[in-house]
Amino acid sequence: MTADYQARALQDPSTLVQELFRTCATTENFPRLVAEHFSRLFERPASFKKIPILNVRSPPQSHQDRALVRFRAMVQDTSLSTEMYLSTHHDGSCGGWGMYEAEAGSSSNASQVDYASLQECNVLWATSLPAESDWCADELDGLEPGQQLTADAAPSVPPVVQRSYKFPHSDRGHVGLQVKVYDKNEVDTFKSTDVVTFVGIITTEPCGLEHTQETASEVPTLHVLFTKSHTPNLLPRPFPRLSRPAGKDHHDSILGETANPVAQDTADTRRELISWIAEEALAGDLQAAEWVLLSCIARVQSRHPPLLPPSLVVSRFPAPPPVPSTVESPAPPVPTLSAVLGSLLPLTHTLNLSLEGLNKARYTPESKDEDLHAGVLQLPQGTVLLVSEGGVREGQLQERGIMNVRALQEVMDAQTLAYVFPFSQFSFPTDISCIILAEGRKSAFFRPELDIPLRAPTDPAAIAALYKPADQIKMPSRGKLASFRDLVVGARCGKVQVPEATSEHIQSQFVLERQGNRSVTADDLIRWMTVSKLYALSLHETALSVETWQRAKALDDQRRALLI
Amino acid sequence: MPNAPPLFLEGTPSVSGTPRHGSVARRALGMSTPRRNQTPLFAPGTSSPLPFPSSSPTKNKTPTRARRLDSDLPASQGSEPLAFPSSPAPAAMPKNRRGDIHSSFSLTPTSTRSRTKRQGNLPSDDLRSDASHLSMPASSALNLSVPAVPSDDEDDSGEVKAIWGTNVNIQDAMRTFRDFIRGFKVKYRIAYDRERGLRTRILSSPEEGEVLLYEAYLRRMRQTGERTLNLDMHNLAAYPPSKKLQVLLVKYPQEVVPLMDQVLKDLMLEIAEEDQVAGMQDMRGQQGEEEIAEIMSKVYKIRPFGVPPVNMRDLNPSDTDKLVCIKGLVIRATPVIPDMKVAFFRCLTCNHTVQVEIDRGKIDEPARCPRDVCGTMGSMSLVHNRCEFADRQVIRLQETPDAVPDGQTPHTVSLSVYDELVDVSKPGDRLVVTGIFRSMPVRVNPRQRTLKSLFRTFLDVVHIRIGADDRLGVDRSTRPGGGDRIPGVGGVGGGIDMDDDEENPVERQHRTTKREELEAKLRTLSQRHDVYELLARSLAPSIYAMDDVKKGILLQLFGGTNKSIARGGGGGGPRYRGDINVLLVGDPGVSKSQILQYVHKIAPRGVYTSGKGSSAVGLTAYVTRDPDSKQLVLESGALVLSDGGVCCIDEFDKMSDATRSVLHEVMEQQTVSIAKAGIITTLNARTSILAAANPIGSKYNPKQTVTQNIDLPPTLISRFDLLYLVLDHVDEALDRKLAQHLVALYLEDAPVHGSGQDILPLDELSSYITYARSRINPTITEAAGDELVRCYVTMRKAGEDPRSNEKRITATTRQLESMIRLSEAHARMRLSPFVELDDVKEAYRLMRDAINTSARDPTTGEIDMGLLDTGIGRQQRKLRGDLRKAILALLDGAGGNRGLRWAEVLAQLEKQSSVKITTADFQDVIRELEQEGLVKVTGERDRRMIRREQ
């Protein structure tokens, strides 16, 4: 595995596969061998980073044909039919990975097919990661914060995106590819919305989605050599949080071998984080900011019994200031909270609701002519979804709109999303925590579990500040921002134990409460427990103490008091 | 053609350049051949597999018949002037070209082929059956066969004629199959099934087992004119001599199936002739002749089935060109595509004609006229109306939801169906398809000339079965009698081996290994004394307590047996529902919705819908225009979709009246009627309904009756077998337990179900229910019947009140029916074939408890079913009676035609009465009086006047 060999692999992966085939052709599972061989070759992060990236900035067209690339993607559609390929050509060379025999080179009996050497490969459709925030992308691409791709400077080919309906948010820049997976062991592990980095050979091939046409159109195709899976939150962050040595703010440092001590300043960082969110995006309302933070770290913990992230509505969130009609800005302004979340979370998406959008867009994926069209809600697990109702005006919600609202409500209630297939529906598990910004006392469309009214500002300037553009946000220092991210992302991976004592305390408190107040039900208990667990996570506590429980309950009681 | 025979004497090679003539000649030859009934047709040395071995002709052939036969041949033969020299071989004879079977014979080395072919032309053979000729010989084969050498006769003795590339011995295969058809008896299958440990049928007499099944089928085919024989491959395996053939058929279907087709045709003739000789009815004299002639003109096909079905994901390259079986859901079907089987070319210069057969999806257009004299380049032009076409249709088959691995999207495969199978299935059908797995090369890159290295796969279908997927756990009694047979192509021999065996033994066998274990497990489970509690506990493990509710719902999932009066008009008479409907009413926050969600997951064909969101349309069915076909199609709603299952409706009270009214029909008649966009139809919705409703004002008011508490019409409420009030009481001990339960559940990171109790996993519970529902149909024993009567009488008696002559209704026949259903369900739950005393007792207990909570009159504390049936309890009825009298008296007292003001009447009554009169009561009474024609109300709102009608 010399550097030279690595360089060759980067330059001409096909030849390497051929060479490998010649030495180990007898291997029963050759694709497995290829996967192992190449993943070993690029095992070290430093060498892995050398593989050119395929993304919106460097789309398939900008790469050479049959070049080695890595593509961090969301599996969008696994329903494409499998294909068969000749694993050995007549001349004894290797087939697969887009290597086909040229007609001229073949002998006269080439029309005969040796069916015994047919092998199967699976075809998927993968798109670039929807909802991925820039800082997360940079970190995963292996770029230092602020560093730009060298290729970016060069005039890149404007991305020509085919089949944009297969991307959840077709108006955004994205890349969609046909991915061919040769290693059978891996195939079944890929599910819709999974995030995977595919490393392989890029080329173009007829699209596997067009079964009925005689001549299928060509689409960019990635022949996978090996894959790399991702942790649930994409970015590894320790829980509980470790302190970062001063001066080094890059993530590598905290994951390095040198064990850093557990950070002691988590409570302070948490406070700073809440006040930053409040200042920049919520008109200074600390309480609302605290609830937003708790929502950000919520995720699906178990499906049986359902321990799902609670959905939160921030009510009384003022509508965006009216835009003078002379200004030509078709898009309603996006709440600043969107940008704030984007700078904290690896995966977040903002849904700016409008009647037109609701009636037009498709929230659930739907299979049309055996081609799965993406839905707005087909998002990777662990996405935080910000839903802004500010753009909704009076009008009629049509059938599609109603279905869309129901789909989103189902995601909040059950964390499942129904994919529509002809004659059947399949429910797929999702993990999307929702934060809704509603203008009125309640959300117009949704019934969330938690409800916090914003201490709404009345003066126009303050309202405008809620919708200020991203570049006007006062960003904290880089070190600070890094510790904010450590806090949020770490908490999302964390686990909380409940000691016996706390459990006893919770039980007796519930019995007491119920004696005092008949309206307290089991639902309240469940909510308190959910909130207290999130509270403990936000403090990076590994065990739920009675104190934290009480503080969490007090927070919830304050919230309830605001509602009346 | 009287002069034909001399031209083609025995032993004369049929060298004439025109195979058309040849075929005619062979027919003629056949006629002149002496009958050789005694000669074993497939004796080694003489038999010739590929050509057309057939039974000998009968003696009494008449020239008339020969002529008629000739005219039966494809039109080309008669109409084409003999002067047109036809190119010799390609597609010389009318063949049974099956689109689904592309023989690989074209790949056969010529030497082998020529040999088999030559033997085919042995003059000693009767060639009568050419109409059913195999599809195998490709053009060149026939070419070679023409200059046949008579001496070839000898050299084939003892030689193994295997099809190249396979180990199919043609003679062996044909002989075995012939033997099978003539020798297979029902008893073999029974012995075979027993060996595999399957449930077998008990024969009524030993003779039954001796029936020659396939001979009987062949006779039936002759009588009905059916041309397809569905062959259960398990029967092949069951018949000892043909065991090997079954393996060959799976491995080399495209070689073996044509052989079988051939044997089938031969045997059809043979049996017909035997019957004719035996003088069977319908086969005598002229009639028999016609029958035989008809058989000769037909093409017969074998449609094998009975390969264990596999998941379509599991099809892999090693299955290529093998017989496989998959299940799935038809999502799209193309219109019928004419698929060219034989192309007909005519030379524009010399009118020479050539036929070219399709070879692996391609037709080679001759570049020049093959006639040496002419030889013009590019003069051959296609004559469309002389080409032969087959019907073809491409179907997209998608995996059924139950076969899709978790978190995956369903896969689809393309199916090619041909001829009779076209248009048999429609989108939405569930199919079990047997076919040949094909790989078709695709061009990878149009700019680059690459060769077949990339393949798409599809299935050439040989056999289709619609429906029959009992994993769905659909109640079988909801399906039409006789099962879903494929219309038109069932063929004699049925989709099913033994005529009365509803369940396909193949599928049974496939699952036997897995199933047996499960079944044994379920059986042992059912023996547990606490199985009832265990199942109820497992139903919704995260929900604390509510044991009776869980038990009631559990019984709902099992369901009673559906009964229909077998005799009676209209083929079956009415059907009595066995479905149990349950309504949960209760305070918010008592996990009603959660229960519904659980049930939806467990129940077979469970559909979950919220009353708030669904319209009547969404619940029932919806007429829409299909974007592809532009036809109006019905899209089933939740109720129709859950036919044979459970429909869970949350927020039942929030439903609009229009939607709710649909449920009246569903819950008693179990149908949904649609009249929309010109489509008027009644769809079956034989579904149990599990509904949850919140009380008016969100908190249940214990001082009021149930009907006053829920905003639902009493007529609808009474249709529920069980109505549970789930109330939230504050009780320290209970609360503590609840808290313990929840804390354990919600605060652990890897939550275990419940607090350490043993419960069944969801899928096991689901399979237990499915198993019980599909297998157990308990009948009521005498003891149980007596107990039912006793319980019913007791319940009714409870309404008798010695102190008053007015009767409260505590039970109606509806309650009796419910009780029967519940007892049946309970017996089913125990997997017991009989409803016993204990079942009835439990049913009675559940009913009583449910009535206790729901039908208790809050004012008197007595049970009154009238509350549920009419919404008005006895107490209230009495009150209204008094009110009515008082109003009439008041109006009579006022006298005159002027009448009294509305408010005035109310005020006066208030004064008189000791109890408060509600406006609602007052309004109801007035409306009643008005309907009876006793009073008349005029004016609007505040100005309303009530006048006594004279």
Image (cartoon, helix red, strand yellow):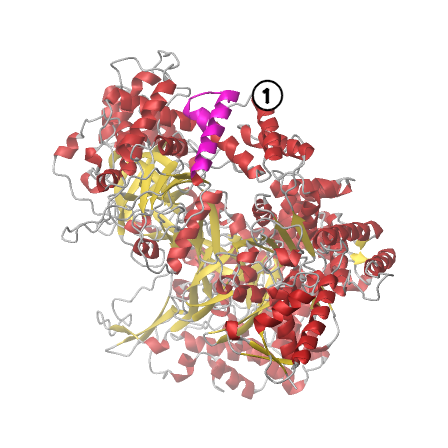
Helix, strand or loop under label 1 = helix
Q: Residues within 10 Å of mark 1 (few under 14, many from 20)?
A: few
User: Residue at the location (19% across, 34% down)?
Assistant: A471
Is A25 displayed left or right of B869 in the figure?
left
Q: Which residue matches tag 1?
A: A500
Our reading of the magenta stretch's main secondary structure is helix
In the rendered image, residue B793, in percent from the top left (x then y), is placed at 84, 61
Q: What is the chain letter for disc 1?
A: A
- Front one among B647 and A1: B647
Between A128 and B465, the one lying in front of the other is A128
In front here: B418 or A410?
A410
When the figure is inspected, residue B322 is found, relative to residue B128, above or below; the finding is: above
Residue B287, horizontal then vertical, whole percent: 64, 85
In this view, B864 is above or below B909: above
Amino acid type at image mark 1: Glu
Q: Is residue B734 left or right of residue B488?
A: right
